[in-house]
Amino acid sequence: MINRKIFRLISGSVLSILLTMVLIFLLFPVIWICLMSFKAPLDIISVTPKFIFRPTIQNYAELFTTSTAFGGGVQGGFWHYFRNSFIITAGAMGLTLLLGLPAAFALARFKFLGRSQIIFTFLTFRFVPELSIILPLYIIFQKIKLYNTYIGLVLAYQLITLPLFVWIVRVFFENIPRELEEAALVDGASWWRIFWQVDLPLVQGGLAAAFILCAIFAWNNFIFGLILGSQDTQPLTVGVLGFMSYEQVLWGQMAAASMLIILPELAVVALVQRYIVQGLMLGALAHQ
Amino acid sequence: MKVMNIRHNIVSKRIWAFQAQIRLPVMRARSPRRLLCLYPAWLPYMLLIPALAVLSLGLFAFLVAIYISMTDFRLIMPSYQFVGLRNFLVLLHDHGFRAALWRTFWFTGALLAVQLPLGMGIALLFQRIRVGVAIWRTFLVIPLMLPPIISGLMWKTMLAPHGPVNYLLSPLGFTDLAWLGNPNTALIAIFFIELWISLPFVVLILLAGLQSLPTEPFEAAAIDGAGPWPMFRYITLPLLRPYIYLVLIFRFIDNLKIFDTIMSTTRGGPGTSTQLIQVFIYDEAFKNKNFAIALAGILIVWLLTWMVTQLMFRRLFK
């Protein structure tokens, strides 16, 4: 009797210890960069890493006022790149919503020639190496004057967000119980009304999952902005590299900028992690 | 301790039977059925065309890539000539390309070899969590949700000679290693950064798999007197095979795409020690201005990716 209790106790605490180690491993970088963003430059380069120090918000202030790191002298450069990130991400998600919802609905609810081929096409976009599309796109965009424009970038981003969005939302559409739609049909609804008033409200959760997941991937994207844009339109992820110039690395400001970039994401993840995990699972597992 | 020859008893038969019908998704995608109302025959196509039109931009770009890879196009010269498959042959003989490719495959293999057991272990741990599952899931997902560029920067600060990593490792004798500045250790550092970023994905998928397992085989095995390790090896692992395959496929493909992390930490250096294939292609295109050769290179990578995924998908759905 006592043996079993002791065994439970020990295994329980071993579990807790292991889980805590995992937790530290997962979170330590984020915590460290958070601390660093509040450190004065002297504290950052000290020989032994300091965990206790006097915090300052100087780094954050400099980001918006005097920092010359972003964009080589653009005053308050952080806002510029933040605006770019926001415009690109919002634009890309808006377009994805517009294009993806009808597509997902069509793939889920209609039987037509070429349906499985089209589904497969959406899948292949996940497996294509991005550079094989971005490099020629670089040339193409320069020819048709879409290089370094918001429209060009929003279009290019569709190649990441649209397939994933359609893939996830399609599964949610397909899982709507037949009875609800048939009830609407009995009442004489057209496909348009069924789409707007029956299906769409029912897939709200899935829609949120797909939207948030795709938005996060769009916000995080680096390579599209790097190659298909230039200083005017590049998002935050590209701008951040400006901190590492040849004279010095502005660690504090870089840490502050990093915190500001990831803060919206952390907040979103904390609030809707259930949806994010659901979206990720569907993105990976629903292969039918 | 008697090792069960699991292939011959009643439990194993049930496992194989179950495995034959195991389907992957957490949420089943049911087959579509037509809306039983009047709609014009062209409607589905109308709904799909806008999305497909935008995606066809990608297809067009891909075709352009194939075309350019067979010319000698360079960014600085406006004129170019068709040269057929010469670029591909040049690349396959190029020492730098082969080295980068080899390095990438080694890196991928090692990463997978570490991710799977580690992810499995963490998934098993997470399965035991009863309280605050949501909070744990939040923490788990964080490395996955951050921009890889930022993750690279975060780790860059931590791996600095006077940074916390060296500080924590100093009892073990490592003092002030410049992880990212030393050609021998840079790739190992990138390895850990990528491990940190991609482990949550592995854990999530394996966790979903673990949570979808039926309890009957385990109960039967317990009655037969099996301990935890035989249960894991003969019941859990075979039943998780589809999930493991999925992890292998996705991680293999994503490992070939590693780019952001390297760009924000070592940029391919020191020397070429961290030049994985995507960085190689990028440098070839924009540093050496050899666009055509870069495209030939990425197409070779695509071909290899395609062959491997075909193989794995076949095995997955056999």
Image (spheres, rainbow, N blue to C red):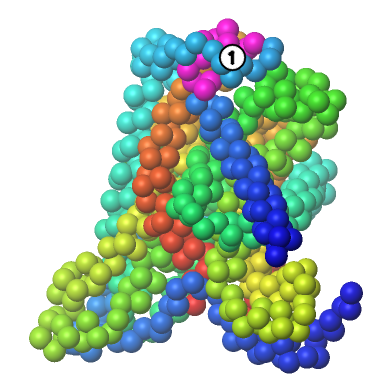
Q: Considering only vertical position in the picture, is B41 above or below A267?
A: below
Q: Considering only vertical position in the picture, is A253 above or below A264?
A: above
Q: Considering only vertical position in the picture, is B71 above or below A21?
A: below
Residue at label 1? Answer: A44
Q: Considering only vertical position in the picture, is A194 above or below A230?
A: below
Task: Give the residue at x 27% y 63%.
Answer: A204
Residue A201 locus on image (x, y percent): 22, 67
Q: Nearer the viewer, residue A239 or A272?
A: A272
Q: Amino acid at mark 1?
A: Ile
- In the rendered structure, which segment of residues is drawn in magenta? A35-46
Residue B220 shown in magenta: no
Q: Residue furthest right?
A: B1
Task: Give the residue at x 54% y 13%.
Answer: A53
Please indicate whether residue B104 sits to the left or right of residue A44 in the image: right
For label 1, the SS is: helix
Q: Could you tell me which chain the residue with mark 1 belongs to?
A: A
Residue A42 locus on image (x, y percent): 58, 7
